[in-house]
Image: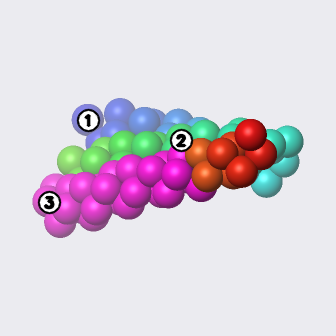
Amino acid sequence: MTLVFNAVAAFLLLTLLVALERIWLGPTASDRMLASQLFGTTGVALLLVLAEAQAAPSLRDVALVLALLSVLAIVGFVTRVVRIDRRES
């Protein structure tokens, strides 16, 4: 089972690299924010996989905090975009 956990963790790390590339090269702010949401979601999944693989329940708590911070980041971004759109209208 450890091999499966390691394979899933490697795949998730590969996904994080793809998201990091999109954050770096994204043509618009929306693309970058969507990629950072992918970064947050994949980070949560990676932490949960590592929690199971290492039998470390504290990593589940860290994953929960990361998920909450990810939600706050998207709310902040949407609020900012709505304010900018209202000024341009």
Question: Of circles 1 and 3, which is in front?
Answer: 3
Q: How crowded is mark 1: few (under 14 residues within 10 Å), some or many (20 or more)?
A: few
Secondary element type, mark 2: helix
Q: Locate the C terminus and report the quarter of the image it occupies.
A: top right
| Residue 82 appearing in the image | yes
**Viewed as shown, does residue 22 lie left or right of 59?**
right
Stretch in magenta: 55-80
Q: Which amino acid does label 1 sit on?
A: Met
Q: Residue 38 carries which label?
A: 2
Q: Where is residue 36 in the image (x, y as percent from the top left)?
A: 59, 49
- Kindly check if marks 1 and 3 are in contact, taking CB atoms under 8 A apart as contact: no
Q: Mark 1 points at which residue?
A: 1
Which of the 4 image quarters holds residue 41? top left
Q: Position of residue 65 (x, y in %)?
A: 28, 62
Secondary element type, mark 1: loop
Question: Of circles 1 and 2, which is in front?
Answer: 2
Which of the 4 image quarters holds residue 68? bottom left
Spatial CA distance of label 1 from label 3 is 18 Å
Spatial CA distance of label 1 from label 2 is 26 Å
Q: Position of residue 26 (x, y in %)?
A: 80, 44
